[in-house]
Amino acid sequence: MKIVVIKGSPHKNGSSNMLAGQFIKGASEKGHKIVELDAAHMNINPCIGCDFCGMNGDCSQKDDVVQIKEALLSADMAVFVTPVYYFGMSAQLKAVIDRFYSYTTRLSSKHLKTALIAAAWDSNDDVMPYLAEHYKKLCRYMNFTDTGMILGTGCGSPAMTSGSIHMQEAYQLGKSL
Ligand SMILES: Cc1cc2nc3c(=O)[nH]c(=O)nc-3n(C[C@H](O)[C@H](O)[C@H](O)COP(=O)(O)O)c2cc1C
């Protein structure tokens, strides 16, 4: 499979990207082709709701979204990688998703496999359900098939994350594909 990993953390070597690295290791060992896109360090503007695209056409904004769009429209799987910010995804990743607007029909007709990889500081049960529900709803709306969620609670810093069980979980998810 061609797997596009979209990273939404400003920390290049931070916790969510560490978990993504483990996923990539496992998936690469199985022979999958990985394309990594660091959305947090690309030039990606928020959707401005101008409706120039009519939900299925060219976007009025000319920025790096075109790379993401081309990668996803030729992919078999997408992986959404994010730190937890106020119980949701980062603005960097949300901007990528909002910009699906101009190619929602084309993307949803691909029936992509997807996964979610998230890192949060807190380790209690009341951190991840909100992000997880949002992701699950997105899957239903976009005809994505979820292959797994790595909900990295207690992954608040690289030191915390490196000793976390979620590193192994992320590796196993990649390896299971
Ligand atoms: C703006 C902001 C909001 C955050 N909100 C939460 C939160 O709601 N719950 C939580 O457990 N951690 C929260 N954190 C902590 C990060 O999720 C945590 O440090 C994570 O490891 C960062 O991942 P990264 O290194 O991949 O960016 C927040 C951090 C920032 C900067």
Image (cartoon, rainbow, N blue to C red):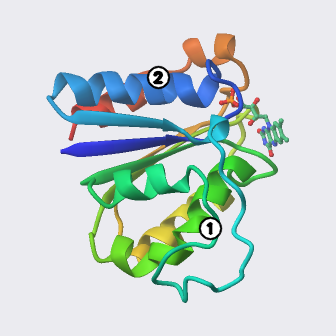
Q: Residue farthest to the left?
A: 31
Q: How crowded is mark 2: few (under 14 residues within 10 Å), some or many (20 or more)?
A: many
Whether residue 166 is visible: no
Say what amino acid the circle numbered 2 marks. Met
Q: Report the side of 118 relative to 84 (left or right).
A: left
What x and y, as percent, mark residue 107? 37, 70
Quadrant into which the N terminus falls: top left
Which residue matches tag 2?
167
Q: Earlier in the sequence, mark 2 or mark 1?
A: 1
Which residue matches tag 1?
98
Q: Residue at x 37, y 30 (%)?
A: 23
Q: Are marks 2 and 1 in contact (CB under 8 Å)?
A: no
Q: How far apart are marks 2 and 1 (CA)?
A: 29 Å
Q: Residues within 10 Å of mark 1 (few under 14, many from 20)?
A: some
What x and y, as percent, mark residue 31? 14, 29
Q: Report the side of 45 relative to 100 (left or right).
A: right
What x and y, as percent, mark residue 86? 82, 50
